[in-house]
Image (cartoon, rainbow, N blue to C red):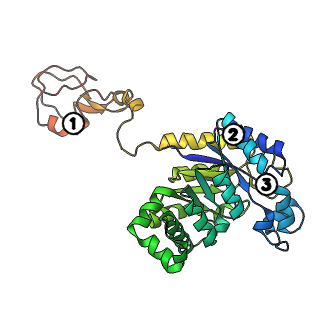
Amino acid sequence: MSVLIIAEAGVNHNGNEQLAFELVDAASASGADIVKFQTFKARNLVTKTAQQCSYQAENIGQSESQFSMLKRLELPIETHFKLLEYCEKKNIKFLSTAFDSESLAFLVNDIKLPLLKLPSGEITNAPFLLEHAKTGCELILSTGMATLEEVENALGVLAFGLLGYDEKLAGRAAFAAAYNSVEGKKALRDKVTLLHCTTEYPAPMDSINLRAMDTLKNTFELPVGYSDHSAGTTIPIAAVARGAVVIEKHFTLDRNLPGPDHKASLEPNELATMVQGVRDVERALGTGEKKPSVVELKNLPQVRKSVVAAASIAVGESFSKLNLQIKRPGSGVSPYDYWQLLQMKADKEYCEGELIEYS
């Protein structure tokens, strides 16, 4: 199965519908599988006094409340329907991340998304995790800022919801029991993909810790991908080489645009380069079976070696270290048979450089 590439438009439309359509164009042209936005109501997401993250204030160039910033970045309901239709036209799948219950219900019931993405900030939001699980949709859970224990706790909530247990039974013990059950493990394998992530924009290279992908995969035995906030295209491509089944990457039309995420995003040509790099690595990974590839077979005789006559050899003359040597091409007797030939005599005459025949 091909690596799923999610081009994260996020809030890089800056609340501008036309910009959102242009982001779809760029994502489609890049070859990405999905273009993803963010769906939220600021009034449901954050208090009016909550401050911005440091990266948001730095990237925007001003300090304000999260509420006022997010209010400007809301994507209107009607725009979602337009984008969904436009994505179908542009042959790319539409996806959006919900950040509140009202938005989740809209995406599931009205937009009818079959796949849902849970952002890193919601990994401890057990009621919201449960709402996602109860939809029965495929789930992608990002794990930025989380410990293994927090990931396991979140998976317990998802297992509980996927199994359809009555919410009246919900609680830490019930979630743990669901996670540890055979049925819960199967439900998670069938529905959930984990994403390793470093929640910083942009994320410094020494904070990436790609080996944590291995830890997630080995610990939870679930498909693992990578949500990237680093600069450039190197790390997501490396993540694919390390086994990522999903790659998510922010992109923008212009990194100089105002907004919290533009500076940590790829521009369209870079997004296309990343997608091509991912596809190249994906093809290069192969099956894992160690054998000559089809394109190698034609070169094998020319680059391997055979036993040849180092000098003229008469019929009946014993083969020796003086009259035998190893040279290209590799279409004659294998060098592995060199020592056996030393115990034999020539049954024909050989000229210098002629391939030795072995019967």
Res. 269 in view: no
Please, what is the three-letter code of the amino acid marked with disc 2?
Cys
Left or right: 48 in relation to 233: right
In this rendering, is residue 256 above or below 87? Answer: below
According to the picture, the residue beneath numbered tag 1 turns out to be 321
Q: Residue at image x 83%, y 52%?
A: 14
* Residue 253 falls left or right of residue 8: right
Task: Give the alpha-carbon distance from disc 3 to disc 1, as whole Å.
Answer: 69 Å
Residue closer to the observer: 195 or 322: 195
Q: Residues within 10 Å of mark 2 (few under 14, many from 20)?
A: many
Mark 1 residue element: loop
Task: Identify the amino acid type marked 1.
Answer: Lys
Mark in front: 3 vs 1: 3
Residue in the image at 50% along x and 53% along y: 243
Q: Which mark is residue 263?
A: 3
Residue 252 vs 336, above or below: the answer is below
Is the C-beta separation of discs 3 and 1 under 8 Å? no
* Quarter assignment of residue 90: top right
Q: Position of residue 350 (x, y in %)?
A: 20, 21
As drawn, the label of residue 87 is: 2
Say whether residue 325 is visible.
yes
Dot 3 or dot 1, earlier in sequence? 3
Query: Residue 75: image x %, image y %?
Result: 79, 52
Q: Quadrant of the C terminus?
A: top left
Sequence-wise first label, 1 or 2: 2
- Above or below, 89 against 254 in this view is above
